[in-house]
Every structure is written in C-alpha cells, then in structure tokens.
Image (cartoon, rainbow, N blue to C red):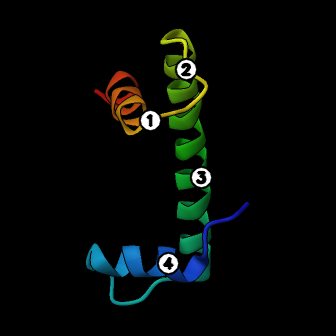
Amino acid sequence: MALPLASIDKLIRKAGAHRVSEGAAKELAIHLQETAIEVAREAVTLANHAGRKTVKGEDIILAKKRLFE
C-alpha cells in the first residue's frame, strides 16, 4: 500500500514549496505511511481494550494524543 505521490506533492506545495522533487515526495509518503500505521496500531489496541472489534474515530483521536502529545 502506498500513498499517491501526486497527493503528497500537493501537500508539500500547500506548505509553501514551489517545486517538489520526486525523492522528497517519496520520503514524506514513507514517513506518513509509517506514522499512520503506528496510530492505527494504537487505535486497535484501544478498541480491543474497550471490548470492541471496530476501530472508531474516537480511538484514532485518542491514539494520536497518546502518541504525539
């Protein structure tokens, strides 16, 4: 599973870049995917702890807080 490089390019441009190399887009895509998997794993743990098989939006929000705040 990979994030579309065109979408990553657009994100970097929204941050103010005029030009974006393919390497920059690839590296950010890798980082974002790794971070998303980390958040998802934490959210699954939280859902399991709550006795649920379904990961909810609130699990993602709490997982982000636990990992990054």
Which residue in the protein does label 2 denote?
52
Q: How far apart are marks 4 and 3 (CA)?
A: 13 Å
Foreground of the two, 21 or 53: 53
Which of discs 1 and 4 lies nearer the camera? The answer is 1
Tell me: 27 left or right of 58. Answer: right
Helix, strand or loop at label 4? It is helix
Amino acid identity at mark 1: Lys
Reply above or below: 67 against 13. Answer: above
Which residue does the image show at 29% across and 78% down from the upper left?
14
Helix, strand or loop at label 1? It is loop
**Residue 1 % position (x, y):** 73, 60
Which residue does the image show at 52% across and 25% down from the upper left?
42
- Mark 1 and mark 4 lie on one chain; the one further toward the N terminus is 4
Which residue in the protein does label 1 denote?
56
- Mark 4 and mark 3 lie on one chain; the one further toward the N terminus is 4
Q: Distance between the residues labelled 1 and 4?
A: 25 Å
